[in-house]
Amino acid sequence: MATSPDPRLRDALEELDSYLADNIAPLLVADAIEVLLEYSPDLTAEVLRAWVATQFQARGGELPVSDLLFHALKKLQVIEELKLLPEERFAGFLVELAGRLLTVCPPGERDRLAASLRFLTETRGPRVASLDRLHRAVGEAPVPRPTSAAAPPQLSSEELQGLRRFSLLLERALPAEPTP
């Protein structure tokens, strides 16, 4: 009689699958990944290999296996970037996992995956998010921007021509204001 797997592990694997499918956020899968850290990276590599095989078949072989493997590892690296797990444990786990994923990648795609993984490690570092919307108190006026002594950059003739075309397009698109 086979013993049933640890229920925590089973739940962690289900959450990982949901995370890879973009059904749950990194914060919600962090505890599950922490459970996986208690096991050999071989287990996670096998789970990711099976996930990649399923995705590959579901998409009719459209996507390269190397891209699917990279996607899975990048999703895990996001958890590291967000510092949701202890860095010293998780970083080593990711390195070992990447090595194992390279071995399951088809030989003709290994160079591509290796290059993607190098890019992944080279682009690590502090992320600077772009601010899309700034919230202010109601009625608060924006702080005036300091004026710079530097002259504005000169536009090329192509840029000037593009601006003229854009302004003509706006004039045609916007209705003329009625004259009093």
Image (cartoon, grey):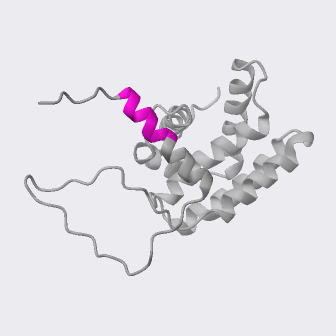
Q: Quadrant of the N terminus?
A: top right
Q: Is residue 38 visible?
A: no
Quadrant hosting residue 157: bottom right
Residue at 40% over, 43% down: 28
Q: Does residue 161 belong to the magenta stretch?
A: no
69 vs 79, left or right, is right
6 vs 141, left or right, is right
Q: What span is in magenta?
A: 165-173
Extreme-left residue of the structure: 139
Q: Nearer the viewer, residue 39 or 157?
A: 157
* Relative vertical location of residue 114 with respect to residue 177 in this rendering, above or below: below
67 vs 6, left or right, is right
Q: Is residue 132 visible?
A: yes
At which x and y percent is residue 74?
A: 62, 48
The secondary structure that dominates the magenta segment is helix
Residue at 70% over, 24% down: 54
Residue at 33% over, 29% down: 174
At which x and y percent is residue 76?
A: 58, 49
At which x and y percent is residue 97?
A: 70, 53
